[in-house]
Image: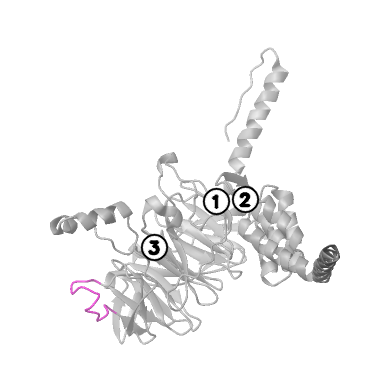
Amino acid sequence: MKKITLRLVPFFGLMLMMSLLIHSKTASAEEDLFYTYTYDYWGIERESPDAYAMNSVMLGSQLGVGDFNAPEGMFIKDNQIYICDTLNNRIVQFSYENDKYTFVREVKEVNNHGKTEALSKPYDVFVTDEGLWYIADYGNMRIVTIDSANEVKGAIYKPEDEETLEADYQFLPKKLVVDAAGRIFVQAENINKGFMEFESDGEFVGYIGAAEVQFDIIDYFYKLISTQEQREQMEAFVPTEYNNIALDADGFIYATLGTFDEGNYKSAQPIRRLNAKGTDILIRNGYYDPIGDVQVGSGGGYKGPSIFSDVTVLENDCYYCLDMTRGRIFGYDFQGNMLYAFGGIGYREGSFRYPVAIGNLGDSLFVLDKELGTITQMTLTEYGKLINDALNTYKVAKYDESADYWRKVLRLNGNYDLAYIGIGRSLLRQDKFEEAMEYFKLKLDYKSYSKAYKLYRKDWIEEHIAIIFTIFIIWLVYLFVRGRIRKFRREVQGE
């Protein structure tokens, strides 16, 4: 820390006070390693307390395995962490327990029926409950499956698919997952038809989750009126490509898009949840769809919308997306509401240079940085735990308890919109519709307000149906009596 020397000058006391004030502000700025924020209904960025605090930043050399060289993938299961050290042609496994990393094994070669084969640029790994490793062996243009003894149990090479794959197509797998049924879903380079799907025996099934074609309406109209030669020179409209894949606890696929029309980024749906048919079933009930930054500019030399490079899903169905554009982490709940965002591009702790993978373990998030070759660990703060507790209790139908946690969140951040909405949702589940409407109205959650109003109206009608029916009968009797009286008068006057 910089040492400040004071000289004896007139008003010594005043100068000393100012120096202490400056020192205090400097120390405070150094301690504040994060900038955490959310977006309100109007799309305005709102600062909030930190949901995660820095825990550690680890290099491969600190873990005793030498520096990582452009690592591309990370997989976390139970308390095991697997790092695809891509340009070192290896996969390194660690265990993490009691805030301590312990080296387990390193895989650089596999035994293929008596023949030793070296891994080449492994991009990703997935480990099953049975302990099988599925490796995206990018440089060898294959997916190889090994057991705990590094024995090859299977391999997948270029599929025999003449209808969709060119003869000179090279099979370059980059990311993969394996579901409970043993089906393998692969994100491969130069494939824009979705994820490649393989059966457990390696048989190619087809593609799943093809992203919609995105195009500009003006360009489309111009193509309609262009000649054949002009159309051939124009850029073709092709589906966008995925760049990563993950599985949640229920076996649904979470996918991130790597390319899309930046002019329409608010509707690009860069994060998706796919069912077995490849249909996107992600819930998007927040102020804005899960797209990362709502307002984008070119500050600090970085421009354009958020581009997610990876996603990790918690047990409570909340998920975190890693943005490679500005190095930020965006958290969303199971309804698509943004929880918070934090991180950035830089060299200080809590920032990244080229984040490529994110995973969760207990109360911690782990981020793999390709450029720095580091693993950054961040742990939930008291504020972050309260938010998680509020969501967890809501998921298991403990609505009173959930509302209590949201009220505690408001004591730490009175501008946190989701806390008001969360209280409203808890009240709604307790059939306290009128109270819920007040909370939804306060934070302009029109969707939830409409739902609460419909239930309130239905409840009010059911509660007052006897009175309404009585008034209706009285009104009918009144009309009948009035009609009889008028008829009687006409008969009397006519006589």
Report the magenta stretch's main SS: loop
Lateral position of residue 486 relative to residue 359, left or right: right
Tell me the kind of residue under disc 2: Asp
Q: How many marks?
A: 3
Residue furthest to the left in view is: 229
- Rendering quarter of residue 210: bottom left
- The residue carrying mark 2 is 50
Q: Which secondary structure, mark 1?
A: strand
Residue lying at 55% horizontally and 47% vertically, measured from the top left: 43
Q: Residues within 10 Å of mark 2 (few under 14, many from 20)?
A: many
Tell me the kind of residue under disc 3: Glu
Q: Marks 3/1: CA distance?
A: 22 Å
Q: Residue 187: say if magenta.
A: no
* Position in image of residue 286 (x %, y %): 57, 58
Q: Marks 2/1: CA distance?
A: 8 Å
Q: Nearer the viewer, mark 3 or mark 1?
A: 1
Lateral position of residue 353 relative to residue 168, left or right: right
Q: Which secondary structure, mark 2?
A: loop
Q: Earlier in the sequence, mark 2 or mark 3?
A: 2
- Highlighted range, magenta: 157-170
- Rendering quarter of residue 268: bottom left
Q: Which mark is residue 342?
A: 1
Residue lying at 55% horizontally and 52% vertically, measured from the top left: 341
> Considering the image in quadrants, where does the C terminus appear?
bottom right
* Position in image of residue 54 (x %, y %): 58, 53
Q: Which secondary structure, mark 3?
A: loop
- The residue carrying mark 3 is 72
Q: Earlier in the sequence, mark 2 or mark 1?
A: 2
* Position in image of residue 147 (x %, y %): 42, 83
Q: Earlier in the sequence, mark 3 or mark 1?
A: 3
Q: Marks 2/3: CA distance?
A: 28 Å
